[in-house]
Amino acid sequence: MPQHYRLRGLFPITRTDAVAFPNLRGMRARTAGLGESVLVSIPSGAKPELDLLRRALGVLTEMAPAAIELGKLFRAAGHELSLVGGPVRDAFLGRASNDLDFATSATPDETQHLLARWGDAHWDIGKEFGTIGARKGDVVVEVTTYRTDRYDPDSRKPLVEFGDSLDGDLSRRDFTVNAMAVRLPELTFVDPFDGLSDLARKVLRTPIAPERSFDDDPLRMMRAARFAAQLSFHVEHGTLAALVAMAARIEIVSAERVQAELSKLVMSPNPRAGLEVLVDTGLADHVLPELPALQLEIDEHHRHKDVYEHSLIVLDQAIAQETGPDGPVPAPDLVLRLAALLHDVGKPATRKFEPGGGVSFHHHEVVGAKIVAKRLRALKYEKQVVKDVARLVELHLRFHGYGDGEWTDSAVRRYVTDAGPQLERLHRLTRADCTTRNRRKAKRLSDAYTHLEKRIETLRAQEEIDAIRPDLDGNQIMKILGIGPGREVGQAYKHLLGLRMERGPLGEDVATEELRKWWADQES
């Protein structure tokens, strides 16, 4: 016997805006008449779906005014309009959004005309793909004509073909949890591929055969990894098998699109889950081969760690050290996360088995910085991101020369100067890089780094350690020495900077004296 639940106060029901969710598989929902309630009939054992429905009704209440208004506008013009994709999925997960995606039977030109009437502003940047955007108040919408996407075997760009039905449009979505819709303005739930059940089970499954889906748009394979990271969902067995079989197909997709998905994965709440999908399916071999290369074969004496697992742990620990929005490293931080993940990519190229069974990775940080820069450039990351991540990788071992606080003040100044604006990230990367299970050793390393941080703060209070410059600038050097611009000015500046590092602030008089001594040595 079905159980009956009355969901009161979740959605306003009026004579003109009845709410119906008639297409839930194994469920029947209908309006219970007027007033603020919806009567839902649901079979025993389907409580997860009911919980999702309850959450969705609450979220859709917030979305309803703008969505219904837009739906009425399109219906009056003779067109279909449905809320689709992420906003529908997120509504069932209890998440509201002001960025709404819609699918429509209207052509892009017809959509643009209607959105110009509806919104405060509209734009047609995605018109060639059938998408028109608009904003009204705080609500941003994108409306896309029903379509299908497919790739030419020899092209990196998808071919867009417009469709003629909502079900057909939903069939081209990446996963069933994103292939649900709400028809407007009547608010009828559409779920032709049983996405609600998959959402309740936290499963990623393609609406059509996964081989066909991934062949049509190989980037969907990257999205599988990304959603595993963002939503903590697992990939259904058949879909996972297709990922393994078709991993090489990702090479047809442009680097920019791959990079966008990888960044979203890395910035997600649980990037480890997505990265494991990339590596386990072989996708990483084509988009980030340095990551699976870290799965070094552990020697028979277990003299060194599984560098891949170590890197994932460092990533987790770096994420735990990100700060709130007002802190020095607000979460999520792409640069810190990429550096944590890739800090040891130089190890495979530098691994050396030493006499007696030891293993060394000399200068892997320098080699790794070059490898990271090359890979991130290939993925079309911004120049500053490439520079910052590579710098952190290059510096991540510097602290290990600190020992028991034996660094001079000069060495501390150089540490801060070399890190530059990456110092706060370097603090967090260095701490995260300690994955030893030896508690005594871990505490000793943590205490040593705390000591270094305190020394940095002490020097910072005494001098402008974050922006160390010589006591004399270029103009002063030229005036004192009676020379014009040229190589000698740069050499003198470098000499004074070295003194500043070694001895701290000198003052203008002492710096002038040291400059004259240096100049005399040059002329002798």
Image (cartoon, rainbow, N blue to C red):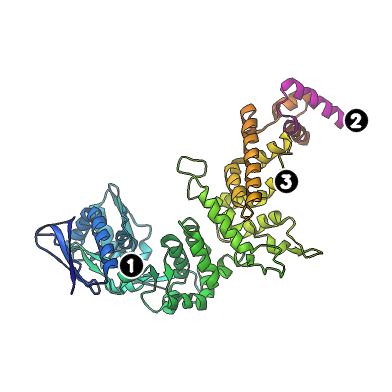
Crowding near the residue tagged with mark 3, few <14, some 14–19, many ≥20 C-alpha atoms within 10 Å: few
Report whether 416 appears left or right of 152.
right
**Of residues 513 and 8, the one drawn nearer to the viewer in this rendering:** 8
**Of residues 23 and 298, the one drawn nearer to the viewer in this rendering:** 298
Locate residue 455: give its quadrant: top right
Location of the N terminus by quadrant is bottom left
Q: Which residue is disc 2 drawn over? A: 524
Residue 500 on the magenta segment: yes
User: Which tag is nearer the camera, tag 2 or tag 3?
Assistant: 3
User: Which tag is nearer the camera, tag 1 or tag 2?
Assistant: 1
Crowding near the residue tagged with mark 2, few <14, some 14–19, many ≥20 C-alpha atoms within 10 Å: few
Q: Which mark is residue 401?
A: 3
Q: Which residue is disc 1 drawn over? A: 200
Count all numbered tags in the image, as a single digit. 3
Location of the C terminus by quadrant is top right
Locate residue 174: give its quadrant: bottom left
**Mark 3–mark 1 CB contact (< 8 Å):** no
On the image, the x and y values in percent for residue 66 come to 23, 54
Q: Residue furthest right?
A: 524
* Magenta stretch: dominant secondary structure: helix
**Of residues 479 and 209, the one drawn nearer to the viewer in this rendering:** 209
Of label 1 and label 2, which has the lower sequence position? 1
Whole-Å distance between the Cαs marked 3 and 1? 51 Å
Query: Range of the magenta residues?
Result: 499-521
Whole-Å distance between the Cαs marked 2 and 3? 38 Å
Q: Secondary structure at mark 3?
A: helix
- The vertical placement of 177 against 401, above or below, is below
On the image, the x and y values in percent for residue 279 come to 55, 68
Q: Which mark is residue 386?
A: none
Report whether 502 appears left or right of 194.
right
Q: Secondary structure at mark 1?
A: helix
